[in-house]
Image (cartoon, helix red, strand yellow):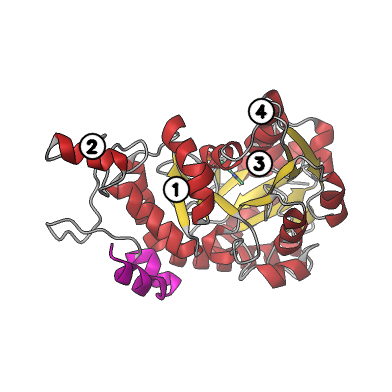
């Protein structure tokens, strides 16, 4: 794409970027983006290959690190996030691991919020220390804990917000300030907010990561991840790490995600609207003992949400009476809402975090994060709100 075309696209609003951003049309003028399902590329001559490899001539070399379909997905994400650079990966976990490892070495130290997705917590707590990278976990909502955890070796801060599954919201701007004072980079896992409801880079974060498996696909079809940053981070750290270690996304999956982005706006808008109605409905139920929804005034960080998010979420966390037995009874009684550990899908999905996504944590670590045995996480889909309300009522009615 020419520089002129790029700057014109950047002025377009998100809804338009979601449909047109980053499109590269081939000589055939196809309407829908082409899938370049190829490992590599051929060159007109040995000299041309040499020029391509030396960087003298732009162009694709090998799909482990560059491919036209993947490039379209990366460019659409880059425009949407307002980042200088974007790189896609095979999964969200590959994005998280690459964002951390590409910049760290033995002797460095990471500060992360405790309330992390189980696998992210494994990377920070178990994997990094194996390679001599220390880590300290803090209560992400307590700014003093972030400050106190900093050591002269601290190079990165890592958090997700809203958190999985208790939907805690962390003040990204304040944590970024503490990170930058310590000369550390802040990495934000923005999965639960989606690129539409929260802009971490604008709030001061240095790197944003996504599991594109969630809302970006939004139809349960494939896995994917994205890392977004400034150009310098890409050039100095990320590009070479991804190129040499190869956690690459398939061009086919990148195409699925590219098509997912086209409908992301309408899906998320509708899901958040439905979730808000369901959360209000649940707030009146005698069968639940705790309700957490980022779109409600009774959310513990409602003031932060007002400042840093443009909407609630399609996720609701609620605790039913009767502990694990009560939670299982409710989950098993749903007729429309399905039991699954995914989220952001067109289908409404319910998860029992303490026995699935957060099973590997100790009971004490779960308790610290508020992940009780009665807690359920509901990812609201695209079904009719009245059908979902009836499904919730029917399932909750099974509790005495
Ligand atoms: C907050 C968060 N980050 C990262 C991931 C990992 O994404 P993936 O499953 O695409 O590897 C998940 C997956 O559930 C998640 O919920």
- The residue at which mark 3 appears reads as 117
- Cα separation between marks 3 and 4: 15 Å
User: Magenta residues, as a range?
Assistant: 1-20
Q: In this view, does 260 lie to the left or right of 127?
A: left
How many other residues sit within 10 Å of disc 1, few (<14), some (14-19) or many (≥20)? many
Say above or below: 384 vs 123. Answer: below
- Nearer to us of marks 2 and 1 is 2
- Residue 280 appears in the picture as rendered: yes
Question: Where residue 393 sits in the image (x, y, percent)?
Answer: 65, 56
Who comes first in sequence, dot 1 or dot 4? 1
Residue at 58% x, 64% y is 199
Q: Mark 4 points at which residue?
A: 127
Q: Can you tell which of label 3 and label 2 is closer to the viewer?
A: 2
Q: In the rendered view, tell whether residue 120 sits above or below residue 294.
A: above
Label 4 residue SS: helix
Q: Earlier in the sequence, mark 2 or mark 4?
A: 2
Q: Is mark 2 on a helix, strand or loop?
A: helix
Residue that lies at the very extreme toward the top in this rendered image: 130
Closer to the eye: label 2 or 4: 2
Residue 265 sits above or below residue 115 on the image = below
What is the quadrant of the N terminus in the image? bottom left
* Cβ at disc 3 under 8 Å from ligand 1: yes
The tag earlier along the polypeptide, 3 or 4, is: 3
Q: Would you name the residue on which mark 1 appears?
A: 87
- Judge whether residue 385 is colored magenta: no
Q: Do the residues labelled 2 and 1 touch (CB within 8 Å)?
A: no
Label 2 and label 4: CA atoms lie apart by 39 Å
Q: Name the residue under label 2.
A: 50
* Labels 1 and 3: the sequence-earlier one: 1
The answer to which quarter of the image holds residue 47 is top left
- Packing grade of label 2 (10 A; few <14, some 14-19, many >=20) is few
């Amino acid at each position: 794409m020419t520089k002129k075309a790029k700057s014109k696209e950047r002025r377009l609003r998100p809804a338009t970027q979601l449909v047109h951003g980053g499109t590269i049309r081939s000589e055939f003028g196809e309407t829908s983006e082409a899938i370049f399902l190829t490992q590599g590329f051929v060159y007109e001559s040995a000299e041309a290959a040499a020029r391509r490899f030396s960087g003298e001539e732009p162009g694709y070399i090998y799909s482990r690190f560059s491919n036209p379909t993947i490039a379209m997905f990366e460019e659409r994400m880059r425009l949407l996030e307002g980042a200088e650079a974007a790189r896609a990966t095979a999964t969200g976990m590959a994005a998280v691991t690459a964002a951390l490892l590409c910049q760290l070495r033995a002797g460095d130290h990471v500060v992360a919020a405790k309330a992390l997705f189980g696998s992210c917590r494994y990377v920070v707590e178990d994997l990094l220390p194996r390679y001599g990278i220390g880590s300290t976990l803090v209560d992400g909502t307590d700014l003093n804990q972030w400050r106190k955890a900093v050591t002269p070796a601290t190079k990165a801060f890592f958090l997700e917000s809203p958190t999985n599954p208790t939907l805690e919201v962390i003040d990204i701007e304040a944590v970024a300030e503490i990170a930058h004072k310590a000369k550390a980079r802040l990495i934000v896992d923005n999965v639960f907010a989606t690129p539409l409801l929260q802009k971490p880079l604008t709030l001061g974060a240095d790197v944003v990561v996504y599991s594109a498996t969630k809302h970006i696909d939004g139809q349960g079809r494939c896995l994917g991840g994205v890392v977004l940053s400034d150009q310098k981070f890409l050039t100095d750290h990320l590009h070479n790490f991804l190129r040499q270690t190869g956690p690459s996304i398939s061009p086919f999956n990148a195409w699925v995600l590219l098509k997912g982005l086209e409908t992301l706006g309408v899906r998320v808008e509708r899901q958040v609207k439905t979730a808000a109605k369901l959360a209000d409905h649940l707030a009146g139920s005698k069968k639940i003992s705790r309700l957490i929804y980022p779109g409600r005034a009774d959310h513990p960080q409602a003031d932060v949400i007002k400042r840093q998010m443009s909407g609630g979420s399609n996720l609701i966390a609620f605790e039913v009476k009767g502990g694990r037995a009560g939670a299982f009874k409710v989950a098993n009684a749903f007729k429309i809402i399905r039991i699954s550990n995914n989220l952001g899908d067109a289908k409404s999905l319910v998860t029992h975090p303490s026995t699935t996504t957060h099973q590997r944590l100790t009971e004490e670590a779960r308790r610290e994060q508020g992940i009780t045995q009665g807690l359920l996480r509901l990812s609201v889909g695209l079904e009719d709100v009245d059908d979902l309300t009836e499904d919730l009522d029917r399932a909750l009615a099974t509790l005495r």
